[in-house]
Image: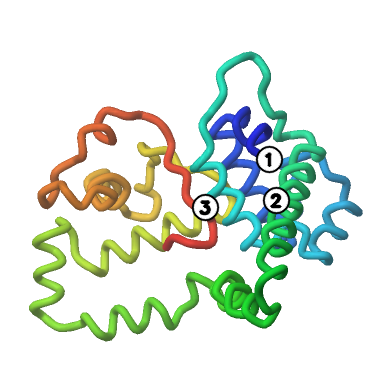
Amino acid sequence: MRDLLSIAEPTDFLQLVWSLASLHEGEFGHARRFGPDFSLQEMEQAKERFRFAPWLLETLVNEYLTTSQRSGPRRLNVKNHNAANALISKLVELENAEDGVWLKAGNILHLVGHLAQRQFPWQRGYDYFFQLYRSLFVFDFADALARFEENVGISVERFAFCGFALRAYLLSYPFASMGIDLHEVKISERERDIVFKGSLCPCCKPGERHRPYAEEQGSLAIRRAHFA
């Protein structure tokens, strides 16, 4: 699996993961637009069989982030459906081998906790309403709201609104430009910059832009099911 991950370009790989997440959620139009060249029948079968379950994709991303990239002309063609299938197959083979080593000395029931820890958060969902409601309810008092605005540079209300706008955009696109125009939904450039850039770096002072982000004109890749 390391041989495959080491020749995958970062942007292409993240776009592949985003499209496979879309496929798993039944959004075949998004999956086909940005991802591999699966047929409709192949996508339906993959969704039904949990071929690209989110906990598998999460593990795949973790493996990618710990794999050194190899230079050279040979690159992984993420638009080819064989690449996606090969990555998942290699990951499953690796996990099966790891489980086999454990089961030689352990009890299969000991793996139940691992399965729950890995899968339950995805099955429950990362961005459901009650998570946001609890946070806003617990910290909805004057001192906390004032402290947040002083440290971050905008109010909790505006920060949450920007997060919802970003979440909505990333339902249809795998990336958001760091300079995306959000005036249509009444989000200023200053608010956008604070949410996209300043909040990503806890070492910065309120309203200060972290230098690598301030100078970069690239894109921000965000897991589609995780951020709001």
Under circle 3, the secondary element is: loop
Q: How is the image coloured?
A: rainbow
- Give the residue drawn at x 58%, y 69%: 118
Apparent side of residue 92 relative to residue 145 in the rendered image (left or right): right
Q: Residue beneath label 3, please?
A: 170
Residue 11: x %, y % from top left: 54, 34
Q: Are marks 1 and 3 in contact (CB under 8 Å)?
A: no
157 vs 35: above or below: below
Q: Residue beneath label 2, please?
A: 91
Most foreground residue, 141 or 124:
124
Residue 218: x %, y % from top left: 40, 31
Q: Is residue 5 visible?
A: yes
Quadrant assignment for the C terminus: bottom left
Q: Residue beneath label 1, please?
A: 1
69 vs 83: above or below: above
- Upstream in sequence: badge 2 or badge 3: 2
Q: Residues within 10 Å of mark 2 (few under 14, many from 20)?
A: some
Residue 19: x %, y % from top left: 66, 48
- Upstream in sequence: badge 1 or badge 3: 1
Most foreground residue, 130 or 4:
4
- Image-quadrant location for residue 124: bottom right
Under circle 2, the secondary element is: helix
Label 2 – label 3 distance at C-alpha = 26 Å
